[in-house]
C-alpha cells in the first residue's frame, strides 16, 4: 500500500459483497452512479480507517466583541457606587474643613462642598467607566507560518468574509425554513473553517499539503458555489408556487446535504491535524466524491 492510498479504499476481505454478480442476467443492466450502495461506504466505522482515531481540536471561536475575549469590566455597583460614595466623602470633608477653620460661612461651605463633590464624582466616574482596551489577541496567522501557507490561509479568510457577507444579505429574503437552515449551516461551516485556519498544526504545513489545498477549495470554490445556487433559489421562492415551489425547496434540501458532506470533509481535515497525519489532495477529493455517492447526491460543485 502506498502512502497516498488509504485502508478504506480497499475492498473488504470478508463478509457479503454488495457488488453485482456477473453470473446473473440482471447484473448486466447498466446503472447510474448512486443507484446502488458502494462496497466501501464511508460509515463512521469505515472513516476510522482513514487515520488514527483522535479527539476533536479543543477551543471555541468567538467574535472580537465577545466578553470572553475582552478585558473584564467592573460590576455596575462599582461603576455607579464608587463615584457617588467618593464624591460624597469629598464634599463632606470640604464642608467640615471650611466650617472648622472659619474660612467661610455655611453658604460658602455648602457651595465649596458641592463643587468639590461634583468634581470628585466626575473624576472617579470617568476613571472607573473609561473604555477598557481589549486584551491583546494572538494573530490569526502566526508569524512563523511559511509565506506560501500564509497566502493561502489569507485567501481562505477573505473568502469566508465574503461568503459571510452574502449570507447576511440573504437572511432578510429567506422566509422559508429550509432557506434559513441552509444559511445557518453555511455560517456553521465558515466558523469551523476559521477555527482550522487558527490551528497551529495547519499553519505549520506547506501550502501544497492536501489539507491546506482542500480547505482552500472548500472555502474559495465549493461553499461560494453552493451559496450562489441557494441565493438563486431563495429569490425564486418569492414568486414560485405549487409544484415549482416544491421543486425549489427540494433543491435547497439537496444543497444543505451537500454542505453536510463538506462539513465531513472539514471534520476529516481536523482529524488529520490532531492525529499528525497528512493525505494528498486527491485522497481528500476522493473522500468527498464517495460521500456524495453514498448519499445519492448529484453535487453542483465539481470536486
Image (spheres, rainbow, N blue to C red):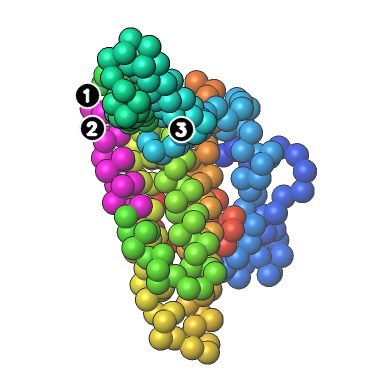
Query: Which mark lies nearer to you, 1 or 3?
Result: 3
Q: Give the percent coordinates (x, y) of residue 30.
A: 56, 69
Could you say which disc has been placed on residue 151 in the image?
A: 2
Q: Quadrant of residue 6?
A: top right
Q: Badge 2 local density, few (<14 within 10 Å), some, or many (20+)?
A: few
Q: Which residue is tagged 1?
A: 147
* Residue 134 on the magenta span: no
Q: Which residue is tagged 3?
A: 80
Q: Residue at x 31, y 47 (%)?
A: 161
Q: Is residue 126 visible?
A: no
Nearest to the observer: residue 214 or residue 103:
103
Magenta-tinted stretch: 148-164
Q: Residue at x 44, y 70 (%)?
A: 174
Distance between the Cα atoms at labels 1 and 3?
A: 50 Å
Q: Residue at x 37, y 65 (%)?
A: 170
Query: Is there a contact, CB below 8 Å, between mark 2 and mark 3?
Result: no
Query: Is there a contact, CB below 8 Å, between mark 2 and mark 1?
Result: yes
Q: Quadrant of residue 224?
A: bottom left
Q: Badge 1 local density, few (<14 within 10 Å), some, or many (20+)?
A: few
Q: Secondary structure at mark 3?
A: helix
Q: Badge 3 local density, few (<14 within 10 Å), some, or many (20+)?
A: some
Q: Give the percent coordinates (x, y) of residue 77.
A: 52, 31
Amino acid at each position: 500500500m502506498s502512502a497516498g492510498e488509504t485502508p478504506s479504499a480497499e475492498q473488504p476481505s470478508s463478509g457479503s459483497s454488495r457488488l453485482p454478480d456477473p453470473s446473473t442476467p440482471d447484473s448486466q443492466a447498466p446503472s447510474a452512479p448512486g443507484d446502488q450502495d458502494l462496497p466501501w461506504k464511508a460509515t463512521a466505522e469505515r472513516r476510522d480507517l482513514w487515520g488514527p482515531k483522535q479527539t476533536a481540536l479543543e477551543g471555541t471561536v468567538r467574535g472580537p466583541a465577545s466578553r470572553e475575549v475582552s478585558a473584564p469590566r467592573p460590576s455596575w455597583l462599582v461603576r455607579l457606587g464608587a463615584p457617588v460614595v467618593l464624591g460624597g466623602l469629598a464634599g463632606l470633608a470640604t464642608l467640615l474643613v471650611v466650617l472648622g477653620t472659619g474660612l467661610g460661612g455655611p453658604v460658602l461651605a455648602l457651595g465649596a462642598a458641592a463643587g468639590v463633590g461634583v468634581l470628585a464624582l466626575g473624576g472617579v466616574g470617568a476613571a472607573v467607566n473609561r473604555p477598557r482596551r481589549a486584551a491583546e489577541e494572538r494573530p490569526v496567522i502566526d508569524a512563523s507560518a511559511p509565506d506560501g501557507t500564509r497566502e493561502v490561509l489569507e485567501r481562505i479568510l477573505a473568502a469566508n468574509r465574503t461568503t459571510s457577507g452574502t449570507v447576511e444579505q440573504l437572511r432578510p429574503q429567506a422566509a422559508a425554513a429550509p432557506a434559513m437552515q441552509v444559511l445557518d449551516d453555511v455560517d456553521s461551516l465558515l466558523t469551523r473553517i476559521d477555527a482550522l485556519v487558527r490551528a497551529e498544526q495547519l499553519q505549520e504545513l506547506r501550502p501544497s499539503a492536501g489539507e491546506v489545498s482542500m480547505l482552500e477549495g472548500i472555502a474559495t470554490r465549493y461553499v461560494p458555489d453552493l451559496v450562489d445556487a441557494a441565493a438563486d433559489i431563495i429569490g425564486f421562492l418569492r414568486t414560485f408556487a405549487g409544484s415549482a415551489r416544491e421543486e425549489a425547496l427540494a433543491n435547497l434540501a439537496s444543497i444543505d446535504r451537500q454542505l453536510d458532506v463538506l462539513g465531513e470533509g472539514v471534520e476529516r481535515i481536523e482529524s488529520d491535524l490532531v492525529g499528525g497525519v497528512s493525505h494528498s489532495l486527491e485522497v481528500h477529493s476522493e473522500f468527498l466524491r464517495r460521500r456524495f455517492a453514498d448519499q445519492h447526491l448529484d453535487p453542483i460543485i465539481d470536486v
